[in-house]
Amino acid sequence: MTEEIGGQDLIDVKIKLLEQLKSAPYKQRLKASHKPFGAGFEPPSLEEIREAFNPYTGAEVGEMLGVDARAVRRWLQDPDTTKGSREIPYAAWRLFLIITGKIPAV
């Protein structure tokens, strides 16, 4: 017995996702901050992070990613005006995009 997702065989779903990833139009549609590390990835801007995290609260994002809400708040602070601000780690950003369905999980 094979696993199913939405009535489709899991292997078929994975094959379709891989085909999407390999297609040029899919790669061109990705924002630089949504690309895999080393494949043209650029860190997201503060505005992009805020937009992506909306409508979730900092506590909800933290729970999704397994981090404290304070860490999320630091990612949302302007580095030019706030001393305790931090850049969002690549792994946390990528995981958030996958969990929220903004990019496929491959």
Image (spheres, rainbow, N blue to C red):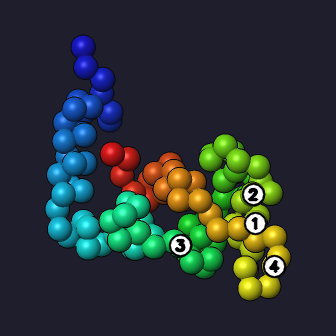
Q: Earlier in the sequence, mark 4 or mark 1?
A: 1
Residue 74, label in figure: 1
Looking at the image, do the residues carrying marks 2 and 1 touch, with CB atoms under 8 Å apart? yes
Whether label 3 touches label 2, CB < 8 Å: no
Residue 44 shows which numbered tag?
3
Q: Label 1 is placed on what type of residue? A: Arg
Cα distance in 3D space between marks 2 and 4: 14 Å
Cα–Cα span, label 2 and label 1: 5 Å
Please state if 3 lies on the left or on the right of 50 as rendered: left
Would residue 61 appear left or right of 38 to someone viewing this image? right
- Look at the image and tell me whether residue 96 can be seen: no
At x 72%, y 79%, the residue is 79
State the image coordinates of residue 106 (x, y, percent, origin top left).
33, 45
Residue depicted at x 40% and y 73%: 32
Which amino acid lies under the numbered mark 2 shown in the image of this protein?
Ala
Numbered circle sitting on residue 104 = none
Q: CA distance from mark 4 to mark 1?
A: 9 Å
Q: Position of residue 85 (x, y in %)?
A: 76, 71
Q: Secondary structure at mark 1?
A: helix
Of 78 and 55, nearer the camera is 78
Dot 2 surroundings within 10 Å: few (below 14), some, or many (20 or more)?
some
Determine whether, in the image, residue 71 is placed left or right of residue 14.
right
- How far apart are the alpha carbons under marks 4 and 3? 18 Å
Three-letter code for the amino acid on which mark 4 is drawn: Thr
Name the residue: 26% across, 67% down.
27
